[in-house]
Amino acid sequence: MNFEFLSDPAGFGLSEGWLQVAFNSPYWQILLAGLFNTLKVALPALLLSTVLGLFIGLGQLAQHPLLKGLCRGYIHLFRNVPLLLQLLAIYFAITQFLPIASQAWSLGDHVFLSKSGLAFPTFSEAPVRGRFSIEGGWALSPEYLAVLLALVVYTAAFVAEIVRAGVQAVRPGMRQGALALGLNNAQTTRHVVLPLALRVAVPSLSNQYLNLLKNASLGVAVGYPELVSVANTAINQSGKAVECVLIILVTYALLSAVAAGLMNVLNTRVNRGAL
């Protein structure tokens, strides 16, 4: 194996990403940009899936039958359909049913949604509708949106079940004691039930977050330039298949190790003082 090719010009660039690269950028820089794109979609998806999963998990325990039924239906649907199919369905929905850029849906003349993606203002510039495209602002490509939404709705279904199980694992006496002390239901859930449920939920959440991080590699199916997609192009350009695959393996192993370490720290913190 020879990794000297990493300093050679890659001969291709990326259409989006935190790190700007061009066709004459070296392979190592292109691969680094792919890694940043993986984190660009995985980290927001982690946060959004946690929030959505929390509300759906609590919704399963609601007394209202319609809300409970909708939450359970959501979980059964998205947990049992393969993520790749969900990703393709969302991507085709975005590219087929949204309007073209010149007829983009707008929200307050500052946010635009079209086949070209989602455009919204930055700190210094607001997007405007052009004749053929949305100009200015910050744009998220349809490929990015498809991967983000697929990861969020899929992972949220598993997070919701973890939240439900964690809440149900809290002994009824803890809730009753909080209510007896004068807390209302919302305060009891926020200050007593959820912190105790977190002790049970964190180990299972760790597995889901690791899965989300690795599932971001499915972006290659819709052309999102994450690490695996970029590495595939690098293999075709350089012929260094073994080296590129090894780089992917090591990178994902390191990312998973870092994520697992952070979740272990969180698990230790939330279980501090537990019997």
Image: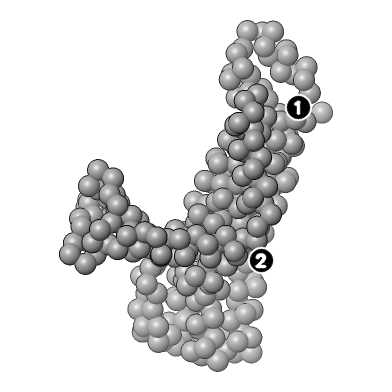
Q: Position of residue 273 (x, y in %)?
A: 75, 28
**For residue 39, side relative to residue 67 (left or right):** left
Residue type at numbered disc 2:
Ala
Can you give x and y, in whole percent of width and height, for residue 113 in the image?
Answer: 33, 55
Q: Estimate the x, y position of residue 186 in percent, counting from the top left.
A: 58, 20
What is the quadrant of the C terminus in the image? Answer: top right
Question: Neighbour class for label 1 at 10 Å: few (<14), some, many (≥20)?
Answer: some
Q: For residue 265, say whether it is visible.
A: no
Q: Left or right: where does residue 179 sit relative to residue 140?
A: right
Residue found farthest to the bottom: 239
Residue that carries the numbered disc 2 in the rendered image: 253
Q: Kindly indicate the quadrant of the structure image that contains residue 69.
A: top right
Q: For residue 132, what is the image quadrant?
A: bottom left
Q: Is residue 140 left or right of residue 46?
A: left
Q: Earlier in the sequence, mark 1 or mark 2?
A: 1
Above-or-below relation of 18 to 31: above
Judging by the rendered image, the residue that carries numbered circle 1 is: 170
